[in-house]
Image (tube, grey):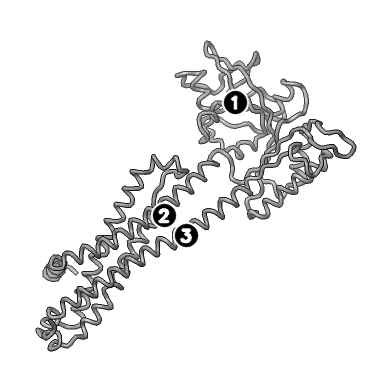
Amino acid sequence: MLDLDFWREILQSIDKNRTRSLLSGFTVAFAILLFTVLFGLANGLNNTFSEAFVDDAANIIFIRSGRTTKASNGLQSGRRIQFKNQDYDYLKSDFEPKVEFITSRVYRNTAASYKNEKNNYTLRAVHPDHKFLEKTKVINGRYINQRDMDNHTKIIVIGDLVRQDLFLDEKIVLGKFVNLSGILYKVVGIYKDDGGDDEERIIYMPLTTAQRIYGNNDYVDQINLTYNPKMDFNQAIDFGLELEKKLKNRFKVAKNDQRAIRVRNMAMQNKGINQMTSVLGVIILIIGFGTLIAGIVGISNIMIFIVKERNKEIGIRKALGASPKSIISLIIIESIFITTLSGYVGLIAGVALLEWSGPSLGDYFITNPSVSQSLIITATFILIIAGAVAGYLPAKKASLIKPIKALRDD
């Protein structure tokens, strides 16, 4: 392989058949370029779906209450459904094997101040499990724990942007007290959230603390939970329907009332996305590999013509004592060289095209289109095999030519 004369012969052969070498190279390069772009677009679409759930657990179920729109069990329509702590306890205990994490929520708007800095924020009162449903990343201090719930402690966990708004350049924030609408709360944690700036301008406190201070009741606005991740999509969807049915029975809501109790199960959405991406992946595989096969067939045909044109040269080589093995290796290496070099050019062009067009593709729900390193390695490996296959058949045929026949061939 390191024989300079051997490689000089290959390069001379390529230069002598420049047009056909360029055509075969273009065929492979275009096939790989299209292959790369298609897989990059598919990855970009998957990235879009992934980012849509970046700040919430993928297996989350949202349970919200509203007003009844239909009369049921002797009760008139228009009745407000109000969740309480007992409903949280009911879901947590009765569905324990199927529930991974669960939390209630109470929402309020609050005016926050620290020294001379003031601003308005959303306040969420939650259970400790909320951290896992919201994918909250505590970067300093801690999150709400069960002791806070039991003791109704006046502590808060603030978003990093809340910290920047109120504490400016202060280095030490934990242990400081923030005034929320006239009541002092101790900062015990700071968090970040990939959901964006709005998610980092939220203040969290223990649910029991908010219930005691803001209303002295056991009301909750919403209950969220995550289903057991061992469930498949169909099991998770059935679980969501079971939750809705039992909650409607619990509150005496008509079965066809869609507003009184609303259960939004992400398993249904995830199943649809999974099916769509699977179908899209199969289509792209078919198109991509079809294009690649077309390129392989193209270079194989071109190699057949190249070998035919070199019949006289091959006859001379055999007359001078060249073995069939040396002739086959010469043609195969030439084919591999053209295929691999052209494929690499197509791969680089495809990656460059994806990087160049990436920012503008966001308008078409394609985020950060790219090709994985493993795919690049696989494509390169396929190219090497393709080049060998494309060159072997004509090389094998050429090695069997009798010298006298090849020398007479015009």
Marker disc for residue 29? none
User: According to the image, label 3 marks what residue?
Assistant: 283
Image-based side of 291 in relation to 315, left or right: right
Q: Are marks 3 and 1 in contact (CB under 8 Å)?
A: no
Q: Quadrant of the C terminus?
A: bottom left
Q: List x then y, in percent, for residue 7.
A: 15, 68
Q: Quadrant of the N terminus?
A: bottom left
Image-based side of 218 in relation to 354, left or right: right
Q: Quadrant of residue 82?
A: top right
- Classify mark 3: helix, strand or loop: helix
Label 3 or label 1, whichever lies nearer to me, is 3
Q: How would you rate the neighbour count of disc 1 (Cα within 10 Å): few for under 14, some for 14-19, many for 20 or more?
A: many
- Say which amino acid is labelled 3: Ile
Q: Quadrant of residue 300?
A: bottom left
Q: Earlier in the sequence, mark 2 or mark 3?
A: 2
Residue furthest front as drawn: 410
Q: Earlier in the sequence, mark 1 or mark 2?
A: 2
- Say which amino acid is labelled 1: Ile
User: According to the image, label 1 marks what residue?
Assistant: 203
Picture mark count: 3
